[in-house]
Image (cartoon, coloured by chain):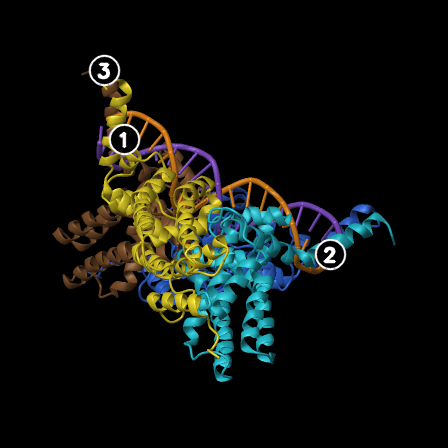
Chain colours: A brown, B blue, C yellow, D cyan, E orange, F purple
DNA sequence: GATGAATGAGGCTTCATTCAT
DNA sequence: CATGAATGAAGCCTCATTCAT
């Protein structure tokens, strides 16, 4: 019952079911590190500890692998955020602050930020990937922010602004941070604390830069 | 005056000047359209109307070609901006507004914005390109903005903020716009007027989002 | 009677008979539809409703599977035809006509025609398959026709022709029809009724094309 | 003027222009020997004495290479045959005999017969190739024969037959011979003289098999 | 200077076969 | 008996770079 064979069998079965997860983890790492075009499927397989061919047992091709990575790692975060917003009860500026900081914590401060960078960087060269990402991630994300803004306006908490425009403004600092994080030193000389940066931004967003008269 | 060094330098400079603008223009177009890794030197040569071999007469390799594009098209803009800032005499908030809008006009609203995107997107895969760009463009650009901010603080026009942090805040909307522009519709559903976006941003930067009490 | 050999043989025969007809049927379908090299064993197993591994329990490899298909589906037809010829009692031209039409009905108008096409098309790339097919099918088939022709000559019903040559002539229309059938429209624009074609051929074979004087 | 350099130069320039022909010759050899799917472009290049990449300087891909082979080697033969038929002045049975024998001599007895075999064998797996071949070769070839038959009927030299049907009958022996030739021993034990076979066929076609009463 | 033919390493994908369970 | 996960050799195609002319 405790012989080596059982151990081996156990390990194998566990791996069999874990394969897709291992591959997705490896793929996420490499897509984030190198981008879409530059990650070689050979390397993904090697990093997952399997051979090239094994990868094709679980994913049709590179594009399918990428989509699976997004579905596995990014969509759940979106789902949770949607719930949070729908159930929020406090002031809309707090909702936005929480949303931004949460977004940073759950995505920006994670490998996942690399996916955002990848899309911005390479979607032009891979239209199908771009389309998929837009439909599954971008449009859902934008709708969430716009809803929060409209809520603030409706409750008289915000000036009467154009939700679409301000959505892009709100989006920009987090995206910027994600980019910087993955530009590995090209765009910043000394390390900047993302939290400090975001608070600076939110501060400006709500109180402005001008000195009080 | 007639020593060998002068002869060599003279020949090199003549050569440098003779480098066909067509090649640099074609390279800029394609780097911007497809990114660094994805532009084929074949296509650059073809678009410039010369043969692939000719390209190698003027540029050692792809990297050298890219550096030449940056030197030819981006560095002059930086030089002019530096002069403007040093000579400015008005309120620092006007200086910043002018700087941002000018940056948009001279770079963001131009093919050149594609270079910024390219660097952010791909510098991780090409360390030498990253190093070059940082040294020649990023560090110079950051220094400019920091100087303007410190001027504002010194003249009592701005709250006493951390110049380094705010530099990044100021940089973000223009970089965002440049990214969006080159994400070919993936990141925005309806077209956004960059000028409107920038004014929204500057507005928030100086007056904040909160409704007046 | 009880020696190991018998046990092995017994087991082997039981195994052989147990070889699922589904696998052979699926293999026939796919070999006919796609050819030898292009049928994937994955697909054969899937179409038979078993796993790929199961296929290897019954057949050593692709070649063995193909041989089994031939043995299962083609050899019985040959056997029956041999009997028919040996027992025939009428005019040799009727024998030939019946033979040709029967051949069409039992093979040509069936999936089995695809095997003939496959052999002609690909035997060059698979010498062992070619050898097997020649020994088991071709040589037996040719012997049959030659015997019928020699019978006709011996009985004074045919001109004194070279049986080997005429064998090939007789063979050609049926083989042609089988080819056409599997060239999926490439070699014929309008659909041709095989029966009409064969009768045209037999007509010409016995009466010639020239107008009667 | 006669130095080694000149010799080398001469050789190189000659090769440059001869490349496509060398590649087409190698491709024809290998397509004929192995079929479409089984010929590796590496081997084509190697047989032409160049590297893999060179092949892609002249042909977009495998399909394009195959089409070029057909255009280069097969279409000219068709053109000549069309002229011959249009200008013929003798008896239609002589025209047909000449056509068949000429077809054998110019195509069947040549490597080109392998193309016919390839198409019959593999067109089902490569629809685009099939379409091309049908449009460029099959339909033109059939039209030719039908025209010759209709001429014979119009001049009272032939019985009043269905041209379409008989076209297929006439086509069959040559196609059969081409197949046999490329079935390398699978379908025939002793070598058969094609000329003897064709004459046997034409004989039967015009005089029938039955012994004179 | 200019050309463009040639190279060959490298990436994606397929599939017959093996083998632990 | 049956499974299906895993392998890895092999094939198509791309493209930065070289070099004879």
Q: Tell me the tag on residue A3.
A: 3
Camera-nearest residue between D165 and B129:
D165
In the image: residue A14, left or right of residue B82: left
| Residue appearing at x 35%, y 58% in the figure | C95
| Residue appearing at x 20%, y 54% in the figure | A93
In the image: residue C14, left or right of residue C185: left
Which residue was labeled with disc 1? A15
Q: Is D127 rendered above or below residue C16?
A: below
Q: Position of residue A153 (x, y in %)?
A: 18, 63
| Residue appearing at x 53%, y 43% in the figure | B131
Q: Is A142 rendered above or below residue C38?
A: below
- The chain letter for the residue carrying disc 2 is D
Q: Tell me the tag on residue C30.
A: none
Which residue was labeled with disc 2? D13
Q: Is A48 rendered above or below residue B97?
A: above
**Considering only order in the chain, which callout, 3 or 1, is on the residue closer to the N terminus?**
3
Question: Which image quarter holds the C terminus of chain A?
Answer: bottom left
| Residue appearing at x 43%, y 59% in the figure | C156
Q: Tell me the crowding category of disc 1: few under 14, some 14 to 19, or many 20 or more residues within 10 angstroms, Cα based.
A: few
For numbered disc 2, what is the local secondary structure?
helix
Camera-nearest residue between D209 and D84:
D209
> Between tags 1 and 2, which lies in front?
2
For numbered disc 3, what is the local secondary structure?
loop
Q: Position of residue C80 (x, y in %)?
A: 29, 48
Camera-nearest residue between B187 and C81:
C81
- CA–CA distance between discs 1 and 3? 19 Å
- CA–CA distance between discs 2 and 3? 73 Å
């Amino acid at each position: 019952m405790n012989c080596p064979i059982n151990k081996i069998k156990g390990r194998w079965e566990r791996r069999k079911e874990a394969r897709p997860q291992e591959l997705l983890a490896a793929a996420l790492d490499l897509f984030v590190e190198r981008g879409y075009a530059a990650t070689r499927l050979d390397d993904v397989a090697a990093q997952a500890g399997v051979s090239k061919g094994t990868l094709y047992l679980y994913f049709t091709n590179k594009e399918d692998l990428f989509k699976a990575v997004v579905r596995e790692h990014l969509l759940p975060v979106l789902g949770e955020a949607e719930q949070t917003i729908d159930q929020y009860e406090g002031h809309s500026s707090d909702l936005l602050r929480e949303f931004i900081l949460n977004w940073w914590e759950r995505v920006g401060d994670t490998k996942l930020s690399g996916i955002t960078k990848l899309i911005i960087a390479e979607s032009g060269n891979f239209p199908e990937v771009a389309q998929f990402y837009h439909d599954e991630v971008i449009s859902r994300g934008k709708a969430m922010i716009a809803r929060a803004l409209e809520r603030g306006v409706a409750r008289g908490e915000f000036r009467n602004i154009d939700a679409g425009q301000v959505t892009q403004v709100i989006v920009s600092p987090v995206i910027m941070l994600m980019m910087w994080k993955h530009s590995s030193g090209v765009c910043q000389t000394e390390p900047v604390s993302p939290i400090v940066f975001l608070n600076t931004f939110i501060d400006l967003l709500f109180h402005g830069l001008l000195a009080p008269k």
